[in-house]
Image (spheres, rainbow, N blue to C red):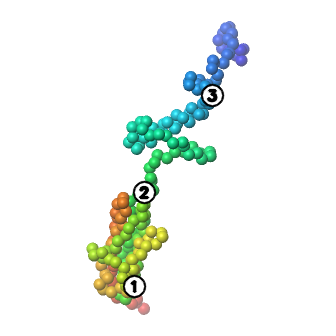
Amino acid sequence: METLLGEATGSRKRKWSPPSGGLFHLPRRHTLEEPLELGLRRRVRASVAHISRLLKGRPEGLEKESPPRKKAGLASFRLGLKSKDRAPSFLRELSDETVVLGQSVTLACQVSAQPAAQATWSKDGTPLESSSRLLISSTLKNFQLLTILVVNADDLGVYTCSVRNTLGTAATTAVLRKAGPRRRGRG
């Protein structure tokens, strides 16, 4: 190495010596008692706490820090936002139906909402309730169902399923029509 240094600088010979303080330049506050990794962890925790306070709208220093929850091998943190909460929306909307009088029909839609949404049904703007010929139900997969056991002419019209939770409302509509007479095919 000295030979290479001597050739590169001409005839001057220089001896290489390590920089004072070791290979890494560490700020004075890092002593042998506090490894570099611990200092970094403290700074990251302080930064996360500062960001959390900013997001919560709190001024600096009012919040006492709690010890972080540790999971082996993973470094992560939460900012306190609840991403699961959402206003109701329809994964599957109602679809128009054509029915034969005297038969049954089920109108169905699938809702996505957190917290869970409450559903109400109406026909031509008039609220509906379950009865001996009209069943209103829901499933564990968040389907809202309206079943008419025996369809008559009074049941034809526009049906609406409205869903509501604390974050909002949504509605979907469908038209229930009478099936026309069957046409015979040509022979």
Q: Amino acid at mark 2?
A: Asp
Residue 171 visible in this rendered orientation of the protein: yes
Residues tagged 2 and 1 counted as in contact (Cβ below 8 A): no
What residue sits 45% from the left and 38% below the top?
50
Q: Is the C-beta separation of discs 3 and 1 under 8 Å?
A: no
Name the front one of labels 3 and 1: 3
Disc number for residue 37: none
10 Å crowding of disc 3: few (<14), some (14-19), many (20+): few
Residue 111's place in the image compared with 186, above or below, is above
Q: Nearer the viewer, mark 2 or mark 1?
A: 2
Residue 75, image x, y percentages: 57, 43
Of mark 2 and mark 3, the one earlier in the sequence is 3
Q: Is residue 100 left or right of residue 125?
A: right
Q: Nearer the viewer, mark 2 or mark 3?
A: 3
Q: Indicate the quadrant where residue 30 lies.
A: top right
Mark closer to the chain start, 3 or 1: 3
**Type of the residue with mark 1:** Leu
Residue at mark 2 to residue at mark 1: CA–CA distance: 36 Å
Q: Position of residue 120 (x, y in %)?
A: 35, 71
Q: Quadrant of the N terminus?
A: top right
Query: Is residue 51 among the parts visible in the rendering?
Result: no
In the image: residue 174, left or right of residue 53: left
As measured in the structure, the alpha-carbon distance from the residue carrying label 3 to the one carrying label 1 is: 79 Å
Measure how far apart labels 2 and 3 are at the Cα level. Answer: 46 Å
Instruction: From the viewer's side, name the closer residue of 111 and 181.
Output: 111
Report which residue position mark 1 lands on.
149
Check whether the beta carbons of the residues at disc 2 and disc 3 lie within 8 A of each other: no
As drawn, the label of residue 85 is 2
Q: Position of residue 84 (x, y in %)?
A: 45, 56
Measured as percent of width and height from the top left, residue 60 is found at: 41, 36
The residue labelled by disc 3 is 33
